[in-house]
Amino acid sequence: MRRIADGDERAYEELVNLHARSILAFGFRLLGTQEEAEEVVQETFLRAWQHAERYEPTARVTTWLHTIARNVALDGLRKRKPRADLALVEAAPDSGRAGAQPGTFLERKRTALTVAEALEQLAPRQREAITLVHYQELSHGEAAEVLGVGVEAVESLLSRARRKLRELLGGVARNER
């Protein structure tokens, strides 16, 4: 990050190449459209370039970038009208796997849609915590840094989110087996 703060374009290009996919997936899960997710990526890396001197070496670069991306995504959410966020439908594991049975594919899509609708009903902070830990695979500590809270708060958010998801989803997960 020091090289980027000094204007090193090659270091900036390396940063983008290393982290753009992760930030794109994060933006997509938070906002639900490819177009908005791409805007999150562009704005995140623009801000990283402009404010590289603010990076604290005690934090991981990925955590810092996810924090920026979260703020950009929240700005985007504030600007748009409410709508159903069904981004996770496209993220269903193995849904497009070659050789999968058509019925299995449709059932997985249906399940993914149900899960996406349940996630939409979570409080925004709970949804962010679930996204960071379970989809972006950040540790509880890293998620805490991104959200600007303590690890205990992240664990509490996750616990409440999981409880709510169990309530909302009922037997969906058991029916999937």
Image (spheres, grey):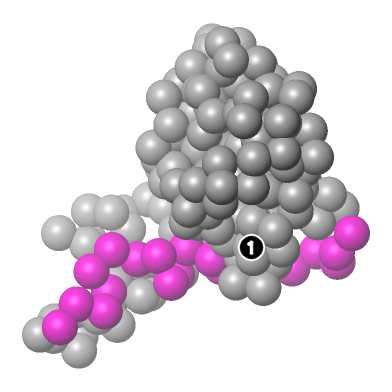
Residue sitting at x 64%, y 56%: 41
| Vertical comparison of 118 with 86: above or below | above
- Asked which quadrant contains residue 36, the reply is bottom right
Which residue is rendered at x = 38% and y = 50% of the image?
170
- List the single residue furthest toward the left: 99
> Which residue is the site of mark 1?
37
Total count of labels: 1
Q: Quadrant of residue 127?
A: top right
Q: Amino acid at mark 1?
A: Ala
Q: Residue at position x 47%, y 63% from top? A: 88
Query: Residue 33 vs residue 143: left or right?
Result: right
- Which segment did they paint magenta? 79-98
Q: Quadrant of the N terminus?
A: top right
Q: Residues within 10 Å of mark 1 (few under 14, many from 20)?
A: many
**Is residue 176 shown above or below 69?**
below
- In the rendered structure, the answer to whether residue 105 lies left or right of residue 73 reads left
Residue 150 in the magenta stretch? The answer is no
Is 91 in the magenta?
Answer: yes
Residue found at the very far right of the displayed protein = 79
Q: Position of residue 147 (x, y in %)?
A: 65, 27
The secondary structure type at the circle numbered 1 is: helix
- Residue at horizontal 50%, vertical 47%? 14
The reply to whether residue 73 is visible in this rendering is: no
Q: Is residue 169 above or below residue 107?
A: above
Majority secondary structure in the magenta region: loop
> Residue extending furthest bottom?
102
Asked whether 17 or 94 is in front, the reply is 17
Q: Nearer the viewer, residue 123 or 20?
A: 20
Q: Is residue 79 visible in this depiction of the protein?
A: yes
- Quadrant occupied by the C terminus: bottom left
Q: Estimate the x, y position of residue 51 in percent, counting from the top left.
A: 79, 33
